[in-house]
Amino acid sequence: MNLDIRTIIVCILVVAYTNAATLLLGCRQGGSFRSVFGYWSLGQALLATGMVLIFYSSLPSNKMVIVISNLLMIAASVAVQEGIGRFVGRRGYGRNVCLAVLVFQITAFTYLTYVQPSLQCRTIIFSIAVVVISGVSIFTLWHHYRWKLQAPEKCLIFLLVIRILLTVSRVVNALMHEYATDVTQLGSVEMLVIMILVPYSVGLTLTFFWLVTHKSGTRISFRRMVGDKSADGIQ
């Protein structure tokens, strides 16, 4: 695949920063959903910042950047999960698991960068972290809604499953083929997965707004029926 990884990363970070700014506007206007939008916006900003740092991770003098960039991208998934937890009224749900993943990520990446450098192993460790946190997000939604999942929640779960499948494909590719030693020399599978992250990021942001507008409309309809003007537990 004759594509420049840096060009693709630039596209992702532009889209991610745009999504972060859009969600930040939702944070300013979101009322009881303010903290939810705040965490989702933070997630997009962390993802974009991590992508920016990848530009410098291939330089020999920037080993610390490798650790920081991947940590930021995992922290992005953690922020999204925190927002989902607050959206369903379960503040901090799954936080311990996410923090444990972050600690493991820092430890593993430090070792695989300074002691036993391996892009292949770092890719596998990163992918496992993404799968675990995405799984926590899916479980958060399922545990709260169960069989009452509406279209927006189903769409979010679908996107999270897509993310897991893409991530698993990276692991399989890393295990079955000779892996690159530098992020600028990634193979076609890796490039394809990274390219898909562009529409995925846009779809995720649109789904976040769909979740909030749908829940707001449901709340208004409920209040009209019962005359209840109290909040519904969004934190």
Image (cartoon, helix red, strand yellow):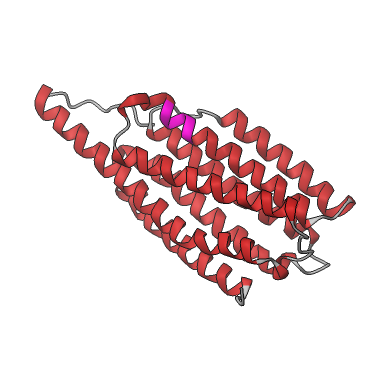
Compared across the picture, whether 30 is left or right of 45 comes to left
Look at the image and tell me whether residue 34 can be seen.
Answer: yes
Q: Residue 33, position in %: x, y?
A: 34, 40
Q: Residue at x 16, y 23 (%)?
A: 228
Q: Residue at x 61, y 51 (%)?
A: 169
In which quadrant will I find the N terminus? Answer: bottom right
Q: Which one is in front, 20 or 154?
A: 154
Mark yes or no: residue 24 visible: no
- Would residue 16 be found to the left or right of residue 146 on screen? right
Image side of residue 8 versus residue 18, left or right: right
- Which quadrant of the figure contains the C terminus? top left
Within the magenta stretch, is there residue 213?
Answer: no
Residue at 60% x, 49% y is: 167
Q: Report if residue 140 lies within the magenta region.
A: yes
Image location (x, y in percent) of residue 225: 10, 25
Part of the protein shown in magenta: 138-142
Q: Residue furthest right?
A: 115
Residue at 68% of width from left, 47% of height from top? 126
Counting from the top left corner in percent of width and height, residue 7 is at: 57, 74
* Foreground of the two, 20 or 143: 143
Q: In the depicted view, which residue is nearer to us: 217 or 194?
A: 194
